[in-house]
Amino acid sequence: MRLGQFVMDTAPLRSSPPFRLVFAVQVIAMVGTNLTVVAANLQVFAITRSSLQVGLVSLALGVALLFGLLVGGVLADRASKRLIIVTTRLGMVVVLGVLAWNSSLDSPSLALIYATAIPAGLINGLGAPALIAATPALVGPENLAAAGALTAVTTQIGAMIGPLLAGFIAESWGLAVCFTIDAATFLLGAVLLAFLPKLEPEGSVEHEHPVRSIVEGFAFLRRSRVVTGLLLIDVCAMVFAMPYVLFPEMGVAVFGGEFATGLLYAAPAVGAFLAALTSGWTATVARSGLVLIGSVLLWGLAVIGFGLSPALWLALLFLAVAGAADTISEILRRTLLQHHTPERLLGRVGSMWLAQATTGTSAGNAVMGGLSRLLGSGMALVAGGAVCVLGVVGIAIALPELRKATLSGPSADEQERVTQGCKVSFT
């Protein structure tokens, strides 16, 4: 493999002006989103001094997100994706305005934070599948892996810059400023993404009963063992080895303060960003499924290392390794899912993937918060990482189709033949 094949492929940015617009908006939005994530977690921990409460707020958001994603997946296959994307971003401006107002009070309300988590989850769930389903139309099937890597870059740029800014802004001007900046990024994104093509749905799915559409998506998951494996392997990492909920506690109580908390949030993003920059090989690797399995195993081992770290620099190193592993996993999962799913089902199947990933993260935060009460933060991380590793090994053994999956696998016609038996009547 030539050295140039390791460099991230930027072909989608060169060939697709709409994708360039999406990329630019996502970079800005991810910075703002990470401001909100860190600010909200810091605020909940400041009010309650409980990592479990931090995890429960995340769980409340995740439950709402799950419902929003299921509905959003159907909408993405039935309506203009541009309209969905723009409308949901405007809705988030209102939610973030409420959070900013609450943070400006002398005694911010924990109940209001829980209450705003519900519409935030619903709105994000409605909008996210449309963006995933739009990608193949914007870049073409030959650029899916490259687009996945670039999407990961937007996430990691935000995850590097956002937490550091959040820690600095929280100490300097207060948490309300974090929420206000995020509201501004969503407003700017809504204006810019209004210039995308309409991205109308293909086929006649808009005439199907909505519940039938959801059932058809679940039926495809049941029949496609590759896509099922993609979802299950992510559950191992997200539910059992999710360290983020412990960052406020470890940053403040173990490593010295709010700025250390920002460093903990940023460290995985640094590793992820470096991995994305050198991700050109992911488009041509022969055994994509096997590499995916290895990357999730590495995530679990890195979480164990983080839990055993006696010093901040070592904790940051393990978190950077975890971030790199997570990015390779994300690129391969996203690309394999888009490659193995017929276009007419991408909105629904993509929403189920996002539902599993995001609600799995929320559940994982709650699980890790509860474990930290029983075992302490360090041992909770070790236990969760070990369960992740064992789960991944079990899935790899049980699903040989996932081990053998490649990006040159079943053609679109073969994928569509899989779905012929997925039609389910609903009366």
Image (cartoon, rainbow, N blue to C red):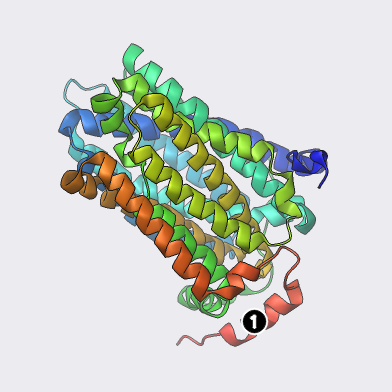
Instruction: Identify the residue at image location x=51%, y=78%.
Output: 222
Q: Is residue 253 left or right of residue 412?
A: left
Viewer-closest of 318 and 354: 318
In the displayed structure, 293 sits above or below 178; it is: below
Instruction: Count every numbered label the image shows and give the total.
Output: 1
Can I make out residue 71 in this image? no
Q: What residue does disc 1 label?
A: 418
Instruction: Identify the residue at image location x=45%, y=69%.
Output: 394
Structural crowding at the residue carrying mark 1, measured as other residues with C-alpha within 10 Å and reported as few (<14), some (14–19) or many (≥20): some
Instruction: Identify the residue at image location x=22%, y=44%.
Output: 372
Can I make out residue 368 in this image? yes
Query: Which image quarter: residue 181?
Result: top left
Q: Is residue 119 left or right of residue 207?
A: left
Instruction: Identify the residue at image location x=38%, y=49%.
Output: 121
State which quarter of the image contains the C terminus: bottom left
Image coordinates of residue 271 in percent, x first then y, are 55, 35
Image coordinates of residue 297 in percent, x first then y, are 49, 54
Q: Mark 1: which secondary structure?
A: helix
Image coordinates of residue 8 in percent, x first then y, are 73, 40
Q: Residue furthest top?
A: 172
Query: Which image quarter: residue 355?
Result: bottom left
Image coordinates of residue 117 in percent, x first then y, are 31, 44
Viewer-closest of 350 and 254: 254
Q: Amino acid at mark 1?
A: Val
